[in-house]
């Protein structure tokens, strides 16, 4: 059974005339690394908030269709029940850290769930080690850089042992190196611990190398859903104005001139490899 | 003309944010000020309209030292668009928001109305003129902020992180808009760490790290230097990364633009046929 | 040189920093009681001096001196008002009485600043929040308290940014008469308020996403436990109180100037 199952999901905000997204049907399997992207206003942020119940329980409004997360119907469960299975990391590093020390922040969710102290201690230490911020555990959030703050946010969610972590444009405010580090950290969670990842991102050139699957939304609907290579190379993606990696763009330019590459590259390393092949091959 | 002469600046809490920076910017130049968060970019830029005065050294705008002029006076020439539009919105309508600065600068009603209409039109916001700025989407708010600065037509426009939170299509539009502004003769300075954006418009790059300027020159030379790029907590532009891996094929290393790149590669492909 | 500098927590490892905030608060209350008990200069001077060892042990001398300097102006104001009010409204017995009484009232104020300063300089907001929790105050209030403190530097920075943004649009905060100056702050306050509201919304989302409200009886990563040092402080404070009450009841207090003139 898929860890997230949505069928014909449609949602309208309380003060909205148009639905934020409509007729969304998707299945996300356990352990997948999914990138969710699309132009501003396409509904991806709202869809994310459905996964842990913020929609409809926090925002109100009208949710039609069905959505099940970790076997639970989102409409039937409270946010704090769903939050134990689906963690949500937000865009602004600062506004999701409340405590005066990193440790206390990571422990926050566990304290809310009345986990016994020794267990909290164990999980907090583990989360801090896993996200590489053990040395920062006694610092105040104000003293940290944006990248470090986002790691704290991830650690705080990780400590709750969710099966799914959803990240809504977590690198918006970070510099490119910081963004790269965060993507690496997220990928580790997926590969080493098997956590299902749903990453909303625009920086496809840096993030798509980790993804098993890309879902593109536009104007409230899912328009493309599949393997990164196929999606990036598609005509629709090009017309929509998505930030297709330049590696793939090079392939398309080459193809227009009759030079074919063996595979669709999505990272610069792949592109370099294939271009080398194509250039030295032709000599033969 | 902007002249920064050996400027040092330390915040009241003691942190030395700018350590001996000297740079000159001529009228009509297009500059990208890049570097890690905390490298001193925003601090430096706040010196250009007098928000901060140097602890040592001086900043001259068209020959006038910023120490001798108020922010309001300097702002007539130097427009600074802040990163977060929500840090400036306080009016009931977009129209009032855009006219705020004009009223402060003493423009009469007639000129104000003309300029506001012009600015709204320029940024495609005319239909929102009676709407509250708080009701608009993120991208629209950024445009209102931009309009409110352009309304008084400063000859120097500084944009602090204009691409944050924008999707690809919005960035394309912004890019064209900024290039056009520069083509019209304005001095444009963008503070950014968006390398792909910079790689496309190829301005003069001033790279800062730890309060100092570590590089100043062409995009293609600076953004393709792995050491410099690392020092500034950036990454190589995608095209440069590809070309770096193809170095042993004898291809040039200073390529950042995808069209230039494909031209070079296709020429090479022709040769090897 | 702000009076408030003496109240901002400094992270230092000293024995006083490790003490339970509830015990420190008891100490502050007892100092307060003793200070109110006496009108005469001598006991208040003793009270002032007795706290200095605490300041030294806590290694917060610099900040403490700053807070003393900051409150000097207000202290002088208290001295003068007391002098004048005793002189004109009675109770005036002799010049010596007038002088010592006014100085005593000033010193009472200073003693209170001193003890509160020691409390806040040596108690981290985290610790304080924990103490509030364990004292039985509902978690919502403790959380609001620590979160507010956590965001003070953020708000301060944001206020500065907003001021910069509006100044860059020609706003001159210092211009105009009194009424105009107040109006000049509207473009500062509104963005600050709107931003705070937006922030609260984002915080609420994040809190919900971390199972806020799941169970009423929360557990805690840290627990305040009374240690030896805490018991020492309790005994010392209560001892001081008992001693003070005894003096107040049975021992007449001489003028300090009389003692000094020996």
Image: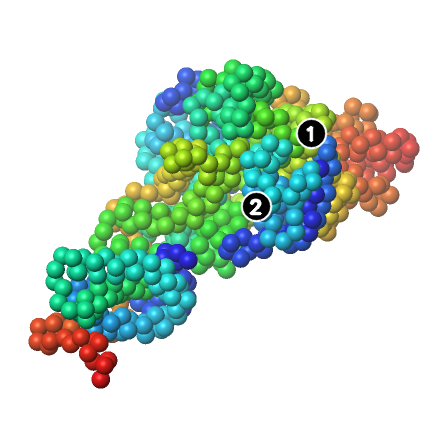
Q: How is this picture coloured?
A: rainbow
Q: Earlier in the sequence, mark 1 or mark 2?
A: 2
- Numbered tag placed on residue A79 in the rendering: none
Where residue A240 sits in the image (x, y, percent)?
62, 22
Disc 1/disc 2 C-alpha distance (Å): 23 Å
In the rendered image, the quadrant that contains the C terminus of chain B is top right
Report the mark closest to the observer, 1 or 2.
2
Where residue A124 sits in the image (x, y, percent)?
42, 55
Q: Is residue C102 left or right of residue B84?
A: left
Q: Residue at x 35, y 43 (%)?
A: C211
Q: Which residue is mark 2?
A: B52
Give the answer, above or below, for where B147 lies relative to A53.
above
- Chain under numbered label 1: B
Q: Residue at x 70, y 43 (%)?
A: B3
- Circles 1, 2 touching at the beta carbon (< 8 Å): no
For the residue pair A235 and C244, the one nearer the viewer reads as C244
Q: Are marks 1 and 2 on the same chain?
A: yes
Where residue B22 sits in the image (x, y, percent)?
70, 49
Q: Which residue is mark 1?
A: B186
Q: Is residue A238 visible to us here?
A: yes
In the rendered image, the quadrant that contains the N terminus of chain B is top right
- Chain under numbered label 2: B
Mark 1, Cα crowd under 10 Å, few <14 / some 14-19 / many 20+, is many
Q: Residue at x 42, y 44 (%)?
A: C155
Q: Residue at x 20, y 80 (%)?
A: C259
Q: Is residue C257 left or right of residue C200?
A: left
For the residue pair C240 and B139, the one nearer the viewer reads as C240
């Amino acid at each position: 059974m898929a860890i997230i199952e949505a069928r014909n999901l449609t949602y309208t905000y309380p003060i909205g005339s148009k639905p934020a997204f409509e007729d969304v049907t998707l299945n996300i399997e356990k352990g997948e690394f999914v990138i969710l992207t699309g132009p501003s206003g396409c509904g991806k942020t709202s869809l994310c908030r459905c996964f842990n119940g913020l929609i409809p329980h926090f925002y109100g409004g009208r949710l039609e269709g069905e959505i099940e997360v970790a076997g639970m119907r989102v409409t039937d469960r409270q946010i704090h029940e769903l939050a134990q299975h689906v963690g949500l990391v937000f865009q602004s590093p600062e506004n999701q850290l409340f405590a005066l020390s990193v440790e206390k922040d990571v422990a926050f969710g566990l304290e809310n769930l009345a986990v016994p102290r020794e267990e909290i201690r164990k999980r907090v230490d583990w989360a801090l080690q896993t996200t590489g911020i053990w040395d920062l555990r006694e610092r105040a959030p104000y003293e940290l850089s944006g990248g470090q703050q986002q790691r704290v946010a991830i650690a705080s969610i990780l400590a709750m042992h969710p099966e799914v972590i959803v990240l809504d444009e977590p690198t918006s405010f970070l510099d490119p190196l910081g963004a790269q580090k965060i993507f690496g950290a997220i990928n580790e969670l997926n590969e080493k611990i098997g956590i299902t990842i749903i990453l909303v991102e625009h920086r496809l050139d840096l993030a798509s190398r980790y993804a098993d699957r890309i879902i593109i939304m536009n104007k409230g609907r899912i328009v493309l859903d599949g393997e990164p290579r196929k999606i990036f190379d598609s005509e629709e993606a090009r017309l929509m104005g998505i930030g297709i990696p330049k590696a793939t763009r090079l392939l398309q330019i080459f193809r227009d001139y009759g030079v074919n590459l063996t595979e669709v590259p999505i990272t610069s390393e792949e592109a370099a490899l294939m271009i080398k092949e194509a250039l030295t091959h032709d000599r033969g | 003309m902007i002249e920064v002469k050996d400027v040092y600046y330390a915040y009241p809490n003691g942190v030395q944010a700018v350590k001996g920076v000297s740079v000159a910017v001529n009228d009509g130049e297009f500059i990208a000020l890049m570097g890690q968060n905390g490298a001193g970019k925003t601090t430096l830029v706040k010196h250009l309209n007098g928000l901060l005065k140097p602890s040592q050294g001086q900043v001259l705008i068209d020959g006038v030292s910023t120490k001798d002029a108020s922010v309001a006076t300097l702002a007539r020439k130097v427009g600074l668009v802040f990163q977060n539009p929500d840090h400036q919105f306080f009016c009931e309508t977009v129209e009032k928001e855009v006219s705020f600065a004009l009223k402060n600068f003493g423009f009469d009603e007639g000129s104000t109305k003309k300029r506001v209409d012009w600015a709204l039109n320029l940024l495609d916001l005319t239909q929102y003129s009676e709407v509250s700025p708080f009701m608009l989407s993120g991208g629209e708010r950024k445009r209102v902020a931009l309009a409110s600065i352009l309304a008084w037509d400063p000859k120097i426009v500084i944009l602090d992180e204009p691409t944050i939170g924008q999707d690809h299509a919005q960035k394309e539009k912004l890019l064209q808009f900024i290039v056009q502004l520069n083509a019209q003769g304005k001095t444009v300075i963008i503070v950014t760490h968006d390398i792909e954006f910079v790689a496309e418009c190829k301005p003069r790059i001033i790279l800062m790290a730890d309060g100092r300027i570590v590089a100043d020159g062409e995009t293609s030379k600076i953004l393709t230097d792995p050491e410099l790029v690392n020092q500034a907590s950036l990454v190589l532009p995608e095209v440069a990364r590809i070309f770096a891996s193809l170095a042993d094929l004898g291809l040039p290393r200073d390529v950042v633009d995808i069209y230039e790149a494909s031209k070079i590669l296709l020429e090479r492909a022709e040769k090897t046929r | 040189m702000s009076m408030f500098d003496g109240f901002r927590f400094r992270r230092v490892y000293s024995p006083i920093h490790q003490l339970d905030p509830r015990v420190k608060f008891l100490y502050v209350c007892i100092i307060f009681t003793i200070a109110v008990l006496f009108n005469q200069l001598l006991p208040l001077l003793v009270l002032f001096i007795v706290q200095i060892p605490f300041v030294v042990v806590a290694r917060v001398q610099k900040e403490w001196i700053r807070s003393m300097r900051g409150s000097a102006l207000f202290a002088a104001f208290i001295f003068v008002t007391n002098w004048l009010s005793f002189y004109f409204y009675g109770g005036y017995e002799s010049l010596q009485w007038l002088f010592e009484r006014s100085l005593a009232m000033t010193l009472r104020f200073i003693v209170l600043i001193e003890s509160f300063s020691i409390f806040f300089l040596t108690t981290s907001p985290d610790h304080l929040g924990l103490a509030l929790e364990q004292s039985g105050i509902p978690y919502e209030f403790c959380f609001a308290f620590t979160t507010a403190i956590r965001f003070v530097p953020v708000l301060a920075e944001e206020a500065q940014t907003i001021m910069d943004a509006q100044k860059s649009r020609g706003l001159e905060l210092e211009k105009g008469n009194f009424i105009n100056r107040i109006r000049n702050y509207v473009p500062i306050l509104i963005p600050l308020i709107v931003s705070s509201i937006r922030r609260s919304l984002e915080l609420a989302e994040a809190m919900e996403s971390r199972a806020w409200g799941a169970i009423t009886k929360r557990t805690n990563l840290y627990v305040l436990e009374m240690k030896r040092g805490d018991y020492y402080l309790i005994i010392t404070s209560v001892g001081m109180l008992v001693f003070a009450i005894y003096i107040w009841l049975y021992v007449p207090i001489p003028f300090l100037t009389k003692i000094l003139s020996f």
